Image: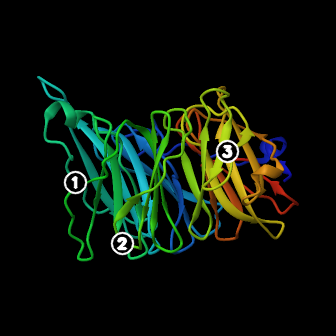
């Protein structure tokens, strides 16, 4: 699949300054949101999110398809060390943060914080603590970053790795109350969790482990999680991501620690090497229609910070793909989305903490226009 960068046209790109609030504070991103951080709301507008030193930054399209954006808006919540997002079919965006509050003596107090954005560009709900599955101070402080998915009925399922290498699940029930923690009886879990809400409403879970990836599936939407057969592969730390590429079937992507390249795998198939040399963190994956075909688009940054993009027919990675430079550089994983006009959108965070956005051009293949600094 042909991929073309819009770097040569960059001279015509309008530039806007990073926003300041009334105090004169510069709202610049300092960290990435884990996983997908560019989302499309029910009204068709895209929203981008990043971590700020004092909380969460948000940029929102002023109208579906852009090109103008509002923001960044800052939602303050101190002491967050990690943040991930989960969006349901209703468009609600759930914020899941790992908070670590230092103590004068002993390890920090660590818990999961949760908030909801009900509509694009609107305020967030209040933040609420969802606790920690471990009461022991030493084990509690070792809790990993929460990662979640929203089922068809709007039920949020989120997972955390414990300090002892286990995996714990917590979710809200049909009445909106939070259930108790569920132990998935995992061992030797490592950082790196891919949670995928399937089109059927059932959630798929893959957790990186020592020498193998552990796999669970929901028996039915809203049902229990059953342990499936492990996948005997080694993955670079926190590199796994997943995409539903057929009804009830996911393709998993990760970085191979031996070769440094991207790998793809579907249950019942073979591990497929995809090349590339991604930096730490997961690559971004997306299904989109290109030239009338169902395709998978992939993006990552290399060790020098250069953003690379590739595309192939969905579930046809074995036919080969070619990584092309976009001309953008970033210190954080890029994000992909499809806007209201059906165009692929690539978002990155620049060295100055500003959002940069490139959109697909109306040319054959995947031709990306110049990035606009928001």
- Which numbered disc flags the more N-terminal residue, 3 or 2? 2
- Asked which secondary structure carries label 1, the reply is loop
- Image coordinates of residue 170 in percent, x first then y, are 27, 58
Instruction: Determine which quarter of the picture holds residue 367.
Output: bottom right
> Pointer 1: what residue?
130
Looking at the image, do the residues carrying marks 3 and 2 touch, with CB atoms under 8 Å apart?
no
- Give the crowd class for mark 2: few <14, some 14-19, many >=20 residues within 10 Å: many
- Mark 2 or mark 1, whichever is nearer to me: 2
Q: Name the residue under label 2.
A: 222
Q: Where is residue 12 in the image (x, y as percent from the top left)?
A: 79, 47
Residue closest to the eye, 56 or 224: 224
Of mark 2 and mark 1, the one earlier in the sequence is 1
User: Residue 146, position in %: x, y?
Assistant: 35, 48
User: In the image shown, does 204 or 299 lie closer to the viewer?
Assistant: 204
Q: Neighbour class for label 3 at 10 Å: few (<14), some, many (≥20)?
A: some
Nearer to me, 204 or 366: 204
Q: Is residue 221 left or right of residue 245?
A: left
């Amino acid at each position: 699949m042909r991929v073309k960068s819009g770097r040569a046209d960059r001279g015509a790109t309008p530039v806007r300054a990073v926003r300041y609030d009334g105090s004169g504070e510069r709202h610049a991103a300092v960290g990435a949101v884990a996983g997908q951080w560019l989302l499309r709301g029910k009204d068709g507008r895209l929203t981008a999110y990043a971590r700020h030193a004092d909380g969460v930054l948000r940029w929102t399209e002023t109208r579906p398809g852009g090109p103008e954006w509002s923001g960044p808006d800052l939602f303050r919540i101190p002491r967050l060390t990690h943040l991930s997002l989960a969006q349901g079919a209703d468009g609600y965006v759930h914020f899941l943060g790992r908070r670590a509050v230092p103590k004068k003596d002993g390890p920090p107090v660590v818990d999961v914080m949760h908030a909801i954005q009900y509509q694009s560009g609107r305020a967030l709900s209040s933040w609420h603590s969802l606790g920690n599955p471990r009461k022991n101070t030493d084990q509690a402080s070792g809790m990993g970053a929460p990662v979640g998915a929203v089922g068809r009925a709007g039920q949020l399922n989120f997972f955390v790795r414990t300090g002892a290498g286990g995996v714990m699940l917590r979710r809200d029930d049909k009445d909106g109350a939070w259930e108790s923690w569920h132990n998935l009886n995992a061992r030797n879990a490592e950082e790196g969790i891919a949670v995928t809400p399937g089109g059927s409403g059932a959630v798929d879970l893959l957790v990186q482990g020592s020498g193998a990836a552990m796999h669970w599936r929901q028996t039915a939407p809203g049902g229990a999680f059953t342990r499936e057969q492990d996948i005997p592969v080694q993955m670079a730390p926190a590199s796994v991501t997943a995409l539903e590429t057929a009804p009830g079937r996911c393709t998993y992507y990760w970085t191979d620690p031996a070769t440094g390249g991207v790998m793809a795998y579907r249950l019942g198939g073979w591990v497929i090497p995809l090349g590339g040399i991604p930096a730490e963190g997961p690559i971004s994956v997306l299904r989109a229609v290109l030239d009338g075909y169902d395709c998978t688009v992939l993006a990552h940054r290399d060790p020098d910070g250069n953003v690379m993009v590739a595309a192939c027919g969905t579930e046809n990675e074995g036919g080969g793909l070619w990584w092309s430079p976009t001309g953008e550089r970033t210190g954080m994983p890029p994000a992909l989305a499809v806007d209201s006009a059906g165009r692929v959108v690539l978002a990155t965070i620049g060295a100055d903490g500003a959002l940069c956005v490139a959109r697909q051009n109306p040319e054959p293949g995947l031709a990306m226009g110049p990035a606009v600094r928001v």
